[in-house]
Amino acid sequence: MLKMKTTTPPPVLHNLLSMQALDAKKITYLLDRADYFLKTAVAKQEVLTTLRGKVIVNLFFEPSTRTRNSFEIAEHRLGAIVLSPDMKQSSTTKGEILIDTICNLEAMGASLLVIRHPDNNLTHFLASELKTKIAVVNAGDGSNEHPTQTLLDLMTIRQHYPDFSRLTVAILGDVSHSRVAHSLIIGLRLMGVERIRIIAPDYFTPEDADLAHLDVFHSMDDGLNNVDIVYALRIQKERMQPEQRPKDDQFFKNFGLTEARLALAKQNAIVMHPGPMNRGVEIESSVADGSQSVILQQTQNSVAVRMAVLETLLNKP
Amino acid sequence: MLKMKTTTPPPVLHNLLSMQALDAKKITYLLDRADYFLKTAVAKQEVLTTLRGKVIVNLFFEPSTRTRNSFEIAEHRLGAIVLSPDMKQSSTTKGEILIDTICNLEAMGASLLVIRHPDNNLTHFLASELKTKIAVVNAGDGSNEHPTQTLLDLMTIRQHYPDFSRLTVAILGDVSHSRVAHSLIIGLRLMGVERIRIIAPDYFTPEDADLAHLDVFHSMDDGLNNVDIVYALRIQKERMQPEQRPKDDQFFKNFGLTEARLALAKQNAIVMHPGPMNRGVEIESSVADGSQSVILQQTQNSVAVRMAVLETLLNKP
Amino acid sequence: MLKMKTTTPPPVLHNLLSMQALDAKKITYLLDRADYFLKTAVAKQEVLTTLRGKVIVNLFFEPSTRTRNSFEIAEHRLGAIVLSPDMKQSSTTKGEILIDTICNLEAMGASLLVIRHPDNNLTHFLASELKTKIAVVNAGDGSNEHPTQTLLDLMTIRQHYPDFSRLTVAILGDVSHSRVAHSLIIGLRLMGVERIRIIAPDYFTPEDADLAHLDVFHSMDDGLNNVDIVYALRIQKERMQPEQRPKDDQFFKNFGLTEARLALAKQNAIVMHPGPMNRGVEIESSVADGSQSVILQQTQNSVAVRMAVLETLLNKP
């Protein structure tokens, strides 16, 4: 008798606004699909017919090169019709007007929107107010969440460590302004990570760190000891008042991820960063480009993981 | 013997600069094709091969999300190569330079241009000066015309009322600055509508209203009585000096389309708006989203009608 | 016995940063391929599968309508996935950050980048610092080079004069700020042109004109005598301080290419210009649109020549 490969049915997902809407099973499904896309369409540079005729609109109210390119490549690889209107100077920034915009795009035949917006409450607002069937992916809302970034981070971690429960993860730097950190902490917990450390100065430490059972360190030497994953964050100068911004050299001196400090982590610890990097501020160039860095691997995974999300949201059973 | 469906041959159209270039027969052909696309490629989310290899360039010298997205979706659904260069900061705004730009795009192999421009005289200038064979669609020139908007409006009206000649249409608000109203009035006349009312304050009433045999009302209560179609316009603040702009609440009090006022129209009157709406200024939210509103239907028709225009201009016999 | 057509194998090219990387044989190969594309895919308005699934990213840090549209059409005709992120307001302008951007685009699966940048040293910097395998095409770096413009110029010249060695070429106007002129002079030399004249006021004459064996004229009447090719340049006001800019009417009076002056060249001399033209400044309108002008032919060739470059860079044996 032939041994059949059992295939998990895709989870039912209508939106991807927050990591909180996922669970370990759904995440695992998405990462498995992403692995599949990485080995097939991405590696072979193919254009699939999966989303042929489906219209995806990328609405970026904040400038972005990296995330937007990554989404656009994923959309094209799936064969979708891709629209990327210039929203930077758009008046469609307020919630009610944005809902009109979304309803109109749905009426024009759009199937999915990828939205980046400076407002922290935007996706929460959309989740409660949007009555349409159009799918929405949160590509970053203020300092709130950035779920597809977390999925590509989890994909990268899984490529190095199959068992999440044993990991110790250190998140460095500007945690309080970071949607990447916020989503990552949710995602790591969902996948079973128990030991999450924050290494940051006081002014970058989130107020609810204790509630979230995060281990807070204010010294790199203490915090990096024995960790498996060192996740350096970009300092989000654009989300701070000028007088709040630390001086680059001062920050690097106290909290920059240097080769010397990285040596305190486990021997095979991996170094991650969501990009774009401020080299010489939160990370030393030799660490960013060093043998422990998986930063370009994160970027490579980004297209595959977004293909998995788009396919799952649009190919509902 | 089989009864054969007689098919009308497509009209010969080189450009679509003004509604004045059309007649009832040509409009009917375009609306029939739009109905066909709505039921087929739009409903089934297809990509056709009709314009495969044809290059269409969208030149928007004014910001636009809605019209541009609608054109781009129509172009992609027909299988065209779609270019949308950023023209907002372009120096190619003056007529002579624009003609050089157009000739160059034709030399590069472009077959059709969709142009939006703040200059009222632009398409008149193009009609007289452009010697090339490239097709041009006017997607809005200042306060002059917006013919594809009118075609989608006529398509929407025809879906509700098969006989144009019996209709009474009321156009509300900022008529004098509205290219939508200007083209709509031409289109309604071509389709046989005899009774067109303007309901507007003095300062929004066009000077040639009498010449155009429009029935002018300065009171909503008088003007809405017994109409079949209530067409509310967007107040075009960007085309007025600051001191000319009416206050939002004052305008809404006197000329806003409310539920109470709509009740004065015929019982099944439809409510239209070209978007984007200023809710609470020219229209009450409950009317915009109410059962008589066909505003999202207009948007849905926009893609199909633009497909019909593009196909007709480019598939010349 | 059948006579077999011998086909030259494509040259091995990884980048196209400078005309200096080419030679007569490589240029001839590219022009032959461009001629082929002009007669086939361009003339027939086709979409090929040559680059299907390959991602090309157009990074234009300077505004451009013409060059960018030409590249995008070439990319679409070859069947590539085309990305054109808005880089005008991007912070990714400095060399090191640009290298991070390029490495990230490669990690996302991009195969080729088309870069336009205001920095004269950019491509020199990339040639020495970029360690990746991604192909880069220089679409204009400051006043340094613009090699694909030169290739389309050479293609246009060859369509009129098969033997480059006998030509006398006059380059008019703002030579010192012109990347077009810089690359053209290199290209003409590589193809065997011995007699190259510069006709320009002192302040537009490059300092190394003698070293480059250019014949310098400060008078149109002297310089145009007996030339085969009259190449008028655009005055690059954006690369001059306001006080350096000549007055338009003064420049036209002394150095504008008029019908009267063109009559001094050989009877069948061709008139070229890289566009966009300042009519009435460096060129008279009747000359730009006259029977000797091949300016639109240059534009037409631009798509075919860029197809040849993209194909050659990406279809490595």
Image: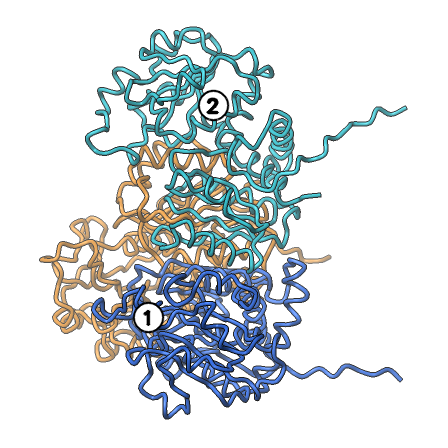
Chain colours: A orange, B cyan, C blue
Identify whether A82 is placed above or below B37: below
Q: Looking at the rendering, in which quadrant would you find the N terminus of chain A?
A: bottom right
**Taking B305 as reference, is A97 left or right?**
left
Secondary structure at numbered mark 1: loop
Give the numbered dot on residue C118: 1
Could you tell me which residue is drawn at 51 percent across and 84 percent down? C168
Q: Which residue is mark 2?
A: B185
- Crowding around mark 1 (Cα neighbors within 10 Å: few <14, some 14 to 19, many 20+) is some
Could you tell me which residue is drawn at 37 percent across and 56 percent down? A149
Please state the total of marks drawn on the protein image: 2
**Taking B230 as reference, is C98 left or right?**
left
User: Circle 1 marks a residue in which chain?
Assistant: C
**Taking C56 as reference, is A61 left or right?**
left
Horizontal and vertical percent for residue C275?
Answer: 44, 65
Identify whether A177 is placed above or below B119: below
Horizontal and vertical percent for residue C3?
Answer: 83, 83
Horizontal and vertical percent for residue A61?
Answer: 32, 48
Q: Amino acid at mark 2?
A: Ile
